[in-house]
Amino acid sequence: MKKIVEVGEIPKIYLHHLSDPEMSKIYYFWGNVHYRLQTRFVNGSCIALIPGKGCALNDSRPLICKVWPFWWISGSKPSADNFPLEINGDCTMATCWNMTEDEILKEFGTSKDTIRKLLLALNRALNEHGEMLKEAAKRNIPPEKLLDWILKKILQNPLESTFNKLFIS
């Protein structure tokens, strides 16, 4: 996992997430800087993305990648089987190629029901992640030791942790 995941400073394009209660919980504040767990990037792309071939992780992609570009509509909660979906505004297929939701689902070989199930799991994992970060802050875990601390915590109770599904499925 440490080959593809790192703790990094929040990119400036995501600073608006800090005002979103659903997203702000996944950021770790330390020394006047916000950090997050993220996949490693090489030349502006995820380390697992192979040009012309797609993701090298295939079915082992993290939940966040499996649901991309879908999300629950802002203000709604993914707590039932039929919550509304939206497409992330950064999705090239929607914004540049004008693909519809159904066309994007077909392109990824998935369905709304599957995306909803994955988003439910992702929501649980994000909540668990937020709780872990609160605990790490109370214990004064510095960012450079945060990933090791989280991995140790997951390994202590692997069956109880949904958080590891954020980066490993």
Image (cartoon, helix red, strand yellow):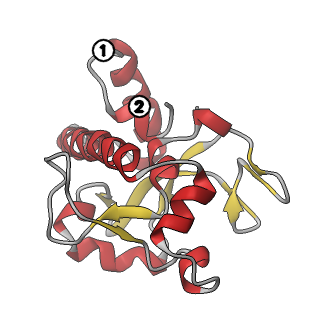
Determine the residue positioned at 34% across, 34% down.
Answer: 163
User: Quick one: 18 or 8, which is closer to the camera?
Assistant: 18
Q: Which of the 4 image quarters holds residue 29?
A: bottom left
Determine the residue positioned at 74% across, 42% down.
Answer: 56
Where does residue 20 sit, x and y in percent of width and height?
A: 21, 72
Instruction: Pick whichever of labels 2 and 1 is earlier in the sequence.
Output: 1
Work out whether 5 lies above or below 157.
Answer: below
Any mark on residue 157, and which?
Answer: 1
Relative horizontal placement of residue 51, taking residue 90 as reference (left or right): right
Q: Is residue 2 visible?
A: no
Determine the residue positioned at 58% across, 48% down.
Answer: 109
Where does residue 81 sit, x and y in percent of width and height?
A: 19, 45
Q: Amino acid at mark 1?
A: Asn
Q: Is residue 51 visible?
A: yes
Where does residue 113 sit, x and y in percent of width and height?
A: 34, 46
Relative horizontal placement of residue 161, taking residue 101 as reference (left or right): left
Q: Which of the 4 image quarters holds residue 129?
A: top left
Q: Amino acid at mark 2?
A: Asn
User: Quick one: 108 or 138, which is closer to the camera?
Assistant: 108
Mark 2 lies on a secondary structure that is helix
Disc 2: which residue: 164
Any mark on residue 139, and which?
Answer: none
Label 2: how many residues lie within 10 Å, few (<14), some (14-19) or many (20+)? many
Mark 1 lies on a secondary structure that is loop
Name the quarter where the N terminus is drawn: top right
Work out whether 144 lies above or below 68.
Answer: above
User: Quick one: 96 or 32, which is closer to the camera?
Assistant: 96
Relative horizontal placement of residue 102, taking residue 35 as reference (left or right): right
